[in-house]
Image: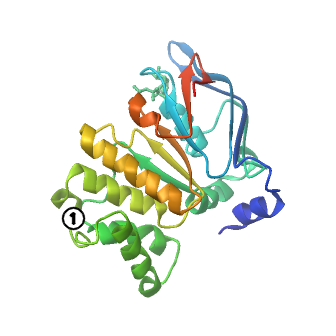
Amino acid sequence: MNEFASSASAVAPAAVPLLQVEKLAKVFQTCHGPVTVLQDLDLSLNAGERLAIIGASGSGKTTLMQILGTLDRPTSGRCRFAGRDLFAATAAELNRFRNAELGFVFQFHQLLPEFTALENVLLPLLIARQNRHAALPQAEALLQRVGLGHRLHHKPGQLSGGEQQRVAIARALVRRPRLLIADEPTGNLDGDTALEIYQLLDDLHRNSALTLVVVTHNEALAARMDRICRLEQGRLVTLA
Ligand SMILES: Nc1ncnc2c1ncn2[C@@H]1O[C@H](COP(=O)(O)OP(=O)(O)OP(=O)(O)O)[C@@H](O)[C@H]1O
């Protein structure tokens, strides 16, 4: 764990939400004038909670995920992770925080096509300077856990869409992040395969204290989470 993340968890009492967003706004400046996508957005998410975010196309779901994932900065407002103000951190601190504390899954898996499933999952550990010998059993165990123990040495092009997304989930979780951010993780999959991915997320949640924010267009899949919010007019409205 990096110094920013460890000092954050050291100062955070148990009652502090894992993620706390206050009065968040995002305005894009374009040649046609400013485009306000998020405004006055509040969100509080406890450790271990699973939140589904739904909303019309263009309502700002990906914009919000990018900000929660610290891949983009808000125009104004505050985002705290375990009590620590994220956007007050330096770029280097944020980088280390992101690598240690966050896992990302996208609609298109973004696996490296030349690498095997095992190598794709191993990579974040090697980038974090873990010894390959120690990292290998961790990556293998996680691939077993997502049901791909028999596909370790297959490349993404040799795997089905659902299998590729399982590898992407294993890659996102291999460094044991506290928050998993999934932007339309099943948008590219058929109904049965999408359901299998959600069952896998259920399993992973049950067996570890994973906190999950998932964007989906599918309300039946959203209903599997603990809470559903709809993004409308720049704000999150709690539905259930
Ligand atoms: N860099 C940018 N510059 C200007 N406008 C942007 C930029 N990025 C996003 N937008 C605008 O912000 C709005 C929200 O986009 P976003 O991708 O967050 O929506 P979304 O809810 O994820 O949509 P979808 O469900 O279709 O993926 C859109 O109107 C989009 O055109």
In the rendered structure, which amino acid carries the disc numbered 1? Lys
Looking at the rendered image, the quarter that the N terminus falls into is: bottom right
What residue is drawn where x is 25% and y is 59%? 113
What residue is drawn where x is 67% and y is 67%? 2
Q: Is residue 207 visible?
A: yes
View extreme (bottom): residue: 133
Q: Position of residue 166 (x, y in %)?
A: 33, 57
Above or below: residue 139 compared with residue 226: below
Q: Residues within 10 Å of mark 1 (few under 14, many from 20)?
A: some
Left or right: 225 as drawn, with respect to 39: left
Element under label 1? Answer: loop
| Residue 216 in which image quadrant | top left
Above or below: residue 199 compared with residue 136: above
Q: Position of residue 225 (x, y in %)?
A: 51, 40
Left or right: 10 as drawn, with respect to 106: right
| Residue 22 in which image quadrant | top right
View extreme (top): residue: 32
Above or below: residue 181 compared with residue 217: below
Q: Position of residue 158 (x, y in %)?
A: 16, 60
Looking at the rendered image, the quarter that the C terminus falls into is: top right
Above or below: residue 232 compared with residue 61: above
View extreme (left): residue: 158
- Identify the colour scheme used: rainbow
Q: Is residue 108 visible?
A: no
Q: Nearer the viewer, residue 189 or 226?
A: 226
Label 1 residue near ligand 1, CB within 8 Å: no
What residue is drawn where x is 53% and y is 72%? 128
Q: Position of residue 110 (x, y in %)?
A: 34, 51
| Total count of labels | 1
Residue that carries the numbered disc 1 in the rendered image: 155
